[in-house]
Image (tube, helix red, strand yellow):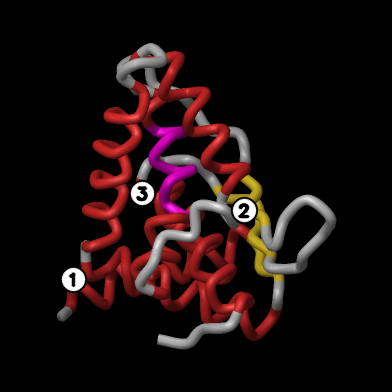
Amino acid sequence: METSSDEATAYHEAGHAVLALILGRPVRCVTIVADRESLGVCEFGKGVFRPSEDWLEREILIALGGLAAEARFTGNYSWDAAAKDQKYVRRLAEQRAGERRAERLQRRLLTKAEHLLDDEGHWHAVELIAAELLRHREISGRTVRHLFERACQEATDG
């Protein structure tokens, strides 16, 4: 499928946002307005951490959510475009599993991120958020949450 850079970026950033919301991390805003460092950004709000929560795994899953959503949309993994996410994930994976086992942990968590996005409501949320990003270039966290909740409700109502 031939896709534009903006479309791929919109799906990438929407993937970060949806994984964040699934895992209880608030989203402040999402943009596909490029700057010198990135093609888009998903900014997070301060989350409330529960003592039982595995924050490191959550951070890795959110970081991989962009790559997973973009790959599902475009049909290929854009590792180069996601180099900043990749570096962050690698650092966290090494912190958790050590240098030798970090890559295996990354693969396992990428599979888990893809599984979370396979949920009908979650993927519909990615599509709605990406479409809104393509229309407006930047959307608020409130809009992201609204679209996420709408998509999940529509999937439940079937």
Which disc number belongs to residue 124?
none
Indicate which disc, 1 or 2, sits on the residue closer to the N terminus.
Answer: 2
List x then y, in percent, for residue 84: 62, 42
Q: Residues under labels 3 and 2: Cα distance?
A: 15 Å
Q: Amino acid at mark 3?
A: Ile
Residue 33 placement: quadrant: bottom right
Mark closest to the chain's N terminus, 1 or 3: 3
Q: CA distance from mark 1 to mark 3?
A: 15 Å
Front-lying residue, 141 or 99: 99
Above-or-below relation of 119 to 22 = below
Circle 3 sits on which residue? 22
The image quadrant that residue 127 belongs to is: bottom left
User: Which residue lies under the disc numbered 2?
Assistant: 42
Nearer the observer: mark 1 or 2; the answer is 2
Q: Amino acid at mark 2?
A: Cys
Please state the horizontal and vertical placement of residue 24, each as a whole percent of the image: 41, 41
- The secondary structure that dominates the magenta segment is helix
Name the residue beneath numbered marker 1.
156
Q: Is residue 62 magenta?
A: yes
Q: Secondary structure at mark 1?
A: helix
Q: Quadrant of residue 10?
A: bottom right
**Quarter holding the C terminus?**
bottom left
Badge 3 crowding class, 10 Å Cα cut-off, few under 14, some 14 to 19, many 20 or more, is: some
| Magenta part of the chain | 58-66
